[in-house]
Structures are given as C-alpha cells and as structure tokens.
Amino acid sequence: MRPEPPFHQQSFRPPSSWPYPRWWAHRGAGRLAPENTLAAFRLGARHGFKAFECDVKISADGVAFLFHDTELERTTSGLGVAEEHTWAQLSQLDAGGWHSPEHVGEPIPTLSDIARFCFETGSDLNIEIKPTPGHDAHTGASVALETARLWAQHTRMPLLSSFSTSALEAARGTAPHLPRALLLDELVPGWLEQSLELGCSAVVIDHPLLDTTVIAQLHAVGLFVMSYTVNDVDVAEQLMRWGVEGLITDVMDRAAWPAGPQLR
C-alpha cells in the first residue's frame, strides 16, 4: 500500500459535519473596536465569541499582517498602499485612533499575533486573503504558507477564504491541507462549479443572495454555507432555519440574539 504524504502535503478533505462555531465576530469585534486589531479580538472574546473573521495581507518584506483596505488612510495614521510598506514601517502606525480616543496607539497585528491569541483562547479563525490588485497569487500563497507554519502543531485549522479565485488557487497549491472557502458578493454563472474546482469546503455568501434553493444546491454537493454580514435578528433566525452553518456578524451583544446566541 502506498503511504500517505506528510500531513502538510495532504489535500484537504471536507468533514462530514460543520467543525466550527455558528457565530463569527466580524474583524474581531464588529464596530465596537478598531477592526482587525488585537483590541477587537479581545473585546469579541469578552462578549463570548470563540470564532473570528479577519483580513490578511503581506507586507513588502513578506510579513503576514491584519488589514482590510488597499490603502492605509481609513484605519491608520499611514499613507499609501499597505502592501508597499515594510513591516518595520507598518508596525509603527496607529491603527486605533481613527476609531476612538481609548484606542489611540493600537498597532496593526501580525498573523502570528492573532494565532497566539487563538491558541491561548481556544478560538477558531476565518482568514480572508486580501490581496492588493495584481498580487493575488503571491498573497494567497504567502498567507497559506504562514498559516500552515503557525498552525503546524495543531489539528484544527483556520478557514482560508477570498473573493479572489487566483488567491485561493495559490493557497491550495502551497498548503492543500488548509480548508478553503470562496467568498461571493454576487452569484455569477458557474459559481458553484468554481467552488468545487477550487476544492472548497464552504462558500461564504452575502446574506441577501441566499435562499433555500441556493443553500440546497450547496448542501447537495457537500459544501457548507457561511453568510456575511448578519446584523439583524430576523435575518439570522431565517438563515438558521434554512440550514446556514456559519454567520459572520458585527453585533457583539449576546442579548441581541435569540438563544443567547448559541455561539458554539
């Protein structure tokens, strides 16, 4: 019998049941803290969340860091394209002052910082690969390589997601054992086939696009369904009735959700 390759070289095999919590804190703590910072993750954890969504880019010198936009201006004290800066430059920026005075001086975290937080708190992570336009394959491969390195001693892997099919294809080529999800903000022709071709385990869809037919299509081919960004109780209840496995939310107040919410 031919021996199996080492774990890090194996292709991802989708589990038979959803392996993650239902509720995911968007960018750490929704709008309650500066997005994609450790302060946000800590606040989300204080609200009871055990699963977090974040955005990850690669610096000019190859460091994986949390950031959403292409440009630095909206959420930091910096200027210009984020990925054109070295980590030494990015690490000096204020990523919290834009949000509120109490967060002035909050730094941009590395993916390594967030991995440490996840290990310490027993949390799951959905890493959205956020390439600068034109750098899709490089970013996908680099984020996957760093994720595989950081979680090398763990069996419960983060979920890699992206709107970029090139980034997901590069991630699969670099670390095929990491689970992947295609992000969709529209249902273009061939979206389901594309998800399967990329070897995804899930599809993350803007919630207004979901209905029972779309969810049934996904479940019929063994794909899980996640939805973003679910901030309305009635919408959340409907999606749960329809069988959506994961919901990404900005609403951190557990009392706002039915049943608590059921975060696990």
Image (tube, helix red, strand yellow):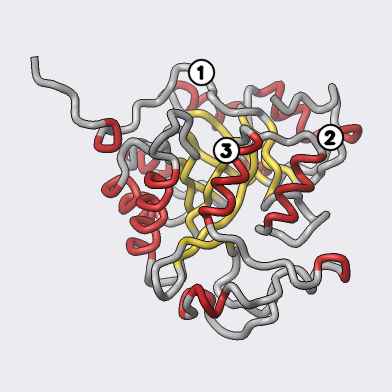
Q: Residue at x 62, y 46 (%)?
A: 53
Mark nearest the camera among 1 and 3 is 3
- Location of residue 140 (image quadrant): bottom left
Q: Is residue 67 above or below residue 46?
A: below
Mark 2 nearby-residue class (10 Å; few <14, some 14–19, many ≥20) = few
**N-terminal-most mark, 1 or 2:** 1
Q: Which mark is residue 17?
A: 1
Going from N to C along the chain, the mark reached first, 1 or 3, is 1
Which residue: 52% across, 52% down?
128
What residue do we see at 84% from left, 34% from top? Answer: 233
Q: Could you tell me how far apart the alpha carbons at marks 1 and 3 are, in whole angstroms? A: 23 Å
Amino acid type, label 1: Ser
User: Which element carries disc 3, helix, strand or loop?
Assistant: helix
Q: Quadrant of the C terminus?
A: top right
x then y, percent, for residue 251: 81, 44
Residues 196 and 173: in front is 173
Q: Secondary structure at mark 2?
A: helix
**Residue assigned mark 2:** 233
**Quadrant placement of the N terminus:** top left
Q: Position of residue 149 (x, y in %)?
A: 38, 47
The residue at the far bottom in this view is: 79
Mark in the foreground, 1 or 2: 1
* Secondary structure of the residue carrying numbered label 1: loop
Name the residue rendered at 34%, 64% in the picture. 138
Q: Which residue was labeled with disc 3?
A: 119
Residue nearest the observer in this picture, 206 or 29: 29
Whichever of labels 2 and 3 marks the residue nearer the N terminus, that label is 3
Residue farthest top in this picture: 1
Q: Amino acid at mark 3?
A: Phe
**Number of residues whose C-alpha sits closer than 10 Å to that of mark 1, classed few (under 14), some (14–19) or many (20 or more):** few
**Mark seen at residue 216:** none
